[in-house]
Image (tube, grey):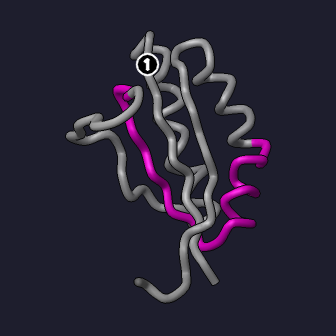
């Protein structure tokens, strides 16, 4: 079964306010078997519009990734993030087939 990923791109406008969201995320993600693969770090935007923070979180499968996003805990946490940042998030199923 293919893993799944949250791919987030975030610009933070108020770091103090955003910290409450960031502090609550690890416990929520861990509850659903997720793990951070990318959490900010050095980057270079080579095409398109970049954002300051880039995050990739791996989950055991697509259904679990969606369940985490839809969970009451994460939905409540979104309310902490929204006033302090602009974010884009996609949830994508990983590729689990033969490589070229």
User: Which residue is most to the front?
Assistant: 100
- Image point 24% across, 39% down: which residue? 43
The residue stretch that appears in magenta:
50-72
Which quarter of the rendering shows the C terminus?
Answer: bottom left
Q: Position of residue 74 (x, y in %)?
A: 68, 41
Check disc 1 and report the residue beneath it. Answer: 12
Q: In the rendered structure, does residue 58 fall within the stretch colored magenta?
A: yes
User: Which residue is most to the bottom?
Assistant: 98
- Image point 61% across, 45% down: which residue? 90
Q: Would residue 55 appear left or right of 69 to someone viewing this image? A: left
Which quarter of the rendering shows the N terminus?
Answer: bottom right
Q: Would residue 71 appear left or right of 84 to someone viewing this image? A: right
Q: Position of residue 34 (x, y in %)?
A: 54, 62
From this view, report whether residue 64 is shown above or below residue 43.
below
- Image point 62% across, 19% down: which residue? 82
User: Few, some or many C-alpha atoms within 10 Å of disc 1 (few <14, some 14-19, many ≥20)?
Assistant: some
Q: In the rendered structure, does residue 24 fall within the stretch colored magenta?
A: no
Q: Position of residue 80 (x, y in %)?
A: 62, 23
Secondary structure of the residue carrying numbered label 1: strand
Disc count in the image? 1
Q: Would residue 42 appear left or right of 78 to someone viewing this image? A: left
**Residue sitting nearer the eye, 70 or 17:** 70
From this view, report whether residue 49 is shown above or below residue 47.
above
**Residue sitting nearer the eye, 70 or 6:** 6
- Image point 42% across, 56% down: which residue? 36
Which picture quadrant has residue 41? Answer: top left
From this view, report whether residue 16 is shown above or below residue 54.
above
From this view, report whether residue 52 is shown above or below residue 37.
above
């Amino acid at each position: 079964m293919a893993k799944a990923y949250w791919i987030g791109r975030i610009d933070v406008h108020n770091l103090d306010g955003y910290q409450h969201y960031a502090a609550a995320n690890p416990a929520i993600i861990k509850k659903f078997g997720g793990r951070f693969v990318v959490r900010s770090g050095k980057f270079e935007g080579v095409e398109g519009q970049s954002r300051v923070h880039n995050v990739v979180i791996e989950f055991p499968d697509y259904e679990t990734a969606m369940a985490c996003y839809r969970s009451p805990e994460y939905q409540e946490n979104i309310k902490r993030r929204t006033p302090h940042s602009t974010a884009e998030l996609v949830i994508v199923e990983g590729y689990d087939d033969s490589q070229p």
